[in-house]
Amino acid sequence: MVSSTTASQTELKANRVPIAWRDGCSALLIPLNICRKKTMYKSWECDHDRHVYEKCQYDDYVRRMKELSKQKREALEEAS
């Protein structure tokens, strides 16, 4: 699933994003990290970027939980 919030592997490697953070919201993490480094990690300077990234993470979590509950429901129906 490639979307507008997923960065390419070369972009991720160039921006030194750890492998654990290379998920569906990785394209939003790159500008956030750049902003953090530029402002010396002042928490109030990059609020907008952080909120956009966290919203993407939350939406991804909700999508995965809905998918999991659907799979569980289908497995129960098959077992019945």
Image: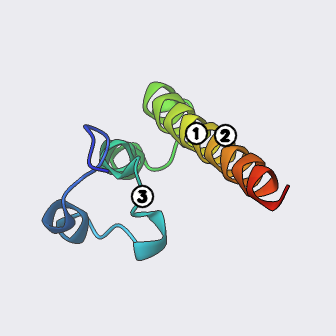
* Display coloring: rainbow
Vertically, is 16 above or below 65?
Answer: below
Q: Residues within 10 Å of mark 2 (few under 14, many from 20)?
A: few
Side (left or right) of 36 relative to 6:
right
Nearer the camera: disc 1 or disc 3? 1
The numbered dot on residue 18 is: none
Side (left or right) of 52 relative to 74:
left
Residue 56 visible in the shown view? yes
Residue highlighted by disc 2: 66
Residue 45 visible in the shown view? no
What's under tag 2, amino acid-wise? Lys
What's under tag 1, amino acid-wise? Arg
Q: Out of 18 and 56, give the one closest to the viewer.
A: 56
* Residue 12, position as x, y percentages in the image: 25, 64
Residue highlighted by disc 3: 23
* Residue 17, position as x, y percentages in the image: 35, 67
Tag 1, which secondary structure? helix
Tag 2–tag 1 contact (CB < 8 Å):
yes
The Cα–Cα distance between marks 2 and 1, rounded to whole angstroms, is: 5 Å
Vertically, is 80 above or below 16?
Answer: above
Q: Residue furthest left?
A: 10
Side (left or right) of 72 relative to 71:
right
Vertically, is 5 above or below 8?
Answer: above
Q: Out of 21 and 32, give the one closest to the viewer.
A: 21
* Residue 10, position as x, y percentages in the image: 14, 67
Residue highlighted by disc 1: 63
Tag 2, which secondary structure? helix
Vertically, is 8 above or below 53?
Answer: below
Q: Residues within 10 Å of mark 3 (few under 14, many from 20)?
A: some
Q: Residue furthest right?
A: 80
Image point 40% across, 50% down: which residue? 24
Image point 50% across, 48% down: which residue? 41
